[in-house]
Amino acid sequence: MRNTMSGKYEGLDNDKQFGMSPVGRLIRDAWVFGLLPDTEQCEGWSAGMLQNLYEKVHAEWMKYGHLPSRLPPELQQRHSDIHSHAISEAKAKGWDAELGEGD
């Protein structure tokens, strides 16, 4: 989790990796499963709050073997739509999917 000096997540819109960080993916997966409204950016959330969200998202993924291909069709489509949109936006903002030496 990327933190500000206060130890809080900066929010999806302010994510240093253009929303492609592990926390960004967690938030989008929470949207897919309806655990958060699509407008929730988690700005100001503590590590504990994000850990609780992770546990809920993990429990949902367990039902499907952690594979998008095993999601029911409506969730597959939602997953594809949400993540494809996020990737397109991140690339438009300068995100590069290639890992650097420090990654």
Image (cartoon, rainbow, N blue to C red):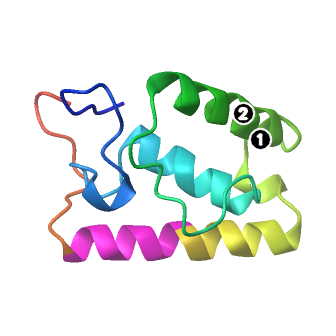
Mark 2, secondary structure of its residue: helix
Q: Is residue 65 visible?
A: no
Q: Nearer the viewer, residue 97 or 49?
A: 49
Q: Where residue 66 sits: x, y (%)? A: 73, 40
Quadrant in the picture for the C terminus: top left
Q: Is residue 51 left or right of residue 44?
A: right
Q: Please name the amino acid that badge 2 sits on.
A: His
What residue is drawn where x is 42% and y is 69%? Answer: 86
Against 92, is 20 above or below?
above
Q: Where residue 19 sits: x, y (%)? A: 35, 56
What residue is drawn where x is 46% and y is 76%? Answer: 85
Number of dots carrying numbers = 2
Residue count near mark 2 (Cα–Cα under 10 Å), binned few <14, some 14–19, many ≥20: some
- Magenta range is 83-92
The answer to if 84 sits in the magenta stretch is: yes
Q: Where residue 97 sits: x, y (%)? A: 27, 55
Q: Which residue is mark 2?
A: 58
What residue is drawn where x is 18% and y is 27%? Answer: 5
Q: Which residue is mark 1?
A: 61
Q: Is residue 98 visible?
A: yes
Q: Nearer the viewer, residue 87 or 19?
A: 19
Q: Where residue 79 sits: x, y (%)? A: 66, 66
The answer to if 90 sits in the magenta stretch is: yes
Q: Nearer the viewer, residue 16 or 76?
A: 16
Q: Please name the amino acid that badge 1 sits on.
A: Trp
